[in-house]
Amino acid sequence: MSEYGKNTPRSPTEFLKAIKGKPVVVKLNSGVDYRGILNCLDGFMNIAMEQTEEYVNGQLKRKYGDCFLRGNNVMYICADMSKILSE
């Protein structure tokens, strides 16, 4: 079973380290979703992603190679389980 399927509690720092290099979904305060591979992030929640897709109201709007999201715009970040489970 992958590390994502375990029901062990972990800290946010451990979670963020575990999803580095994995598919993620980042939701912004504006409601726009960005889906791609988490490249890196810092203590301000500034996020760099690769193979990024932008979704507005659930509809794919744009594809980006690399993307930088400023931390003060980030509502949340989560692992994209649909892509992780299909790997």
Image: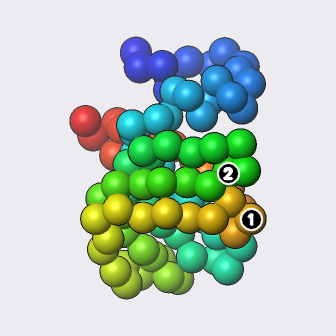
Determine the residue positioned at 38% across, 49% down: 37
Image side of residue 24 versus residue 8, left or right: left
Determine the residue positioned at 49% across, 34% down: 19
Query: Which quadrant, please, contains the C terminus?
Result: top left
Mark 2 touching mark 1, by CB under 8 A? Answer: yes
Determine the residue positioned at 27% across, 40% down: 86
Above or below, comparing residue 75 to residue 39 in the picture: below
Label 1 secondary element: helix
Determine the residue positioned at 48% across, 54% down: 48
Residue linked to disc 2 = 45
| Amino acid bearing label 1 | Asn
Above or below, comparing residue 51 to residue 12 in the picture: below
Whole-percent x, y for residue 66 in the image? 35, 62
Mark drawn on residue 72:
1
Q: What's the CA distance linking mark 2 and mark 1?
A: 7 Å
User: Within the image, what quadrant is residue 15 found in?
Assistant: top right
Above or below, comparing residue 49 to residue 84 in the picture: below
